[in-house]
Amino acid sequence: MAVPFPERVQIVRSPRRKKTVTLTVERGVVRVLVPADLPEVVLQRILKSREAWIRQQLAKVETVSDRPWHERSYLFHGKAYPCRYHHQPNQRRWTCTLEDGAFHVSGPKASPAESDIHTALFRWYRMMARRDFLQRLERWRTVIGVTYLRVRIGNQRTRWGSCSSQGSIQLNWRLIQAPPTVIDYVVVHELCHRLEMNHSSRFWNHVERTLPDYRVCREWLKRHGQRLHELQV
């Protein structure tokens, strides 16, 4: 397939997608989600129009990925922290804490691999995400006046959250790295689907009544969302 830039491109055609085209950058791969019947000439025109943005985002990802873990920073609630490793030869389980302005990972290996560090961080993130998201769901469902059936902490590639017609909500654990206001926006977004299972003007009116500045949070995700996918697990 001819594309206007040399980086790898993965085209995903979905019969469920009717009109919108979504571009994401993850681990050096451009994923383009398009309607199943989108003409090739239209797809190429879209790729060409987004070429500068794609190159810019890939450059950011590649720059960070080239650094070893101990020279990188990791996000929590929108703030970046360094990561320190502590060798504990008698410790069987890997542990992770955030204190004194840094992540502290402890484990039994004298020289841990990056995958060891990232696995420990991932487990900590998942634990914190469940605790944090449940609290926000309870607070905002009371404000909005809705209920939900259950919540699942997932690892979606292209979605930050979803809500089924039965009331099951799924939230991406990677959101725990975003600023609290951005997390609130995604939580409110999904809870408002309990009022409108669509993205109609009525739905967005519900979101705006609850979070008048939701557009700022939505724009943050568009601009910085790829940063939340840097942790490879």
Image (spheres, grey):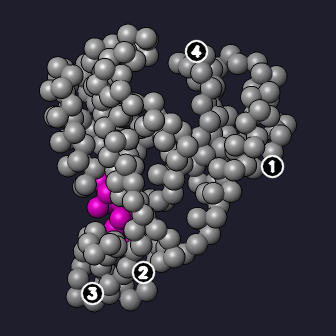
Q: Nearer the viewer, residue 190 or 218?
A: 218
Residue pushed farthest front? 212
As measured in the structure, the alpha-carbon distance from the residue carrying label 3 to the one carrying label 2 is: 11 Å
Q: Magenta span covers which residues? A: 116-126
Evaluate if marks 1 and 4 touch, with contact meaning CB atoms under 8 Å apart: no
Mark 2 neighbour class, 10 Å CA radius: few under 14, some 14 to 19, many 20 or more: some
Quarter of the image that includes the C terminus: bottom left
Mark 4 neighbour class, 10 Å CA radius: few under 14, some 14 to 19, many 20 or more: few
Which numbered disc covers residue 88? 3
Residue located beneath label 1 in the image: 6
As measured in the structure, the alpha-carbon distance from the residue carrying label 4 to the one carrying label 2 is: 46 Å
Query: In the picture, residue 74 is in which quadrant?
Result: bottom left
| Residue 55 percent coordinates (x, y) | 73, 49
Evaluate if marks 1 and 2 touch, with contact meaning CB atoms under 8 Å apart: no
Residue drawn where x is 51% and y is 57% of the image: 230
Q: Vertical placement of 211 versus 3: above or below? A: above
Residue located beneath label 4 in the image: 18
Q: What element does badge 4 sit on?
A: loop
Residue located beneath label 2 in the image: 112
As measured in the structure, the alpha-carbon distance from the residue carrying label 1 to the one carrying label 3 is: 45 Å
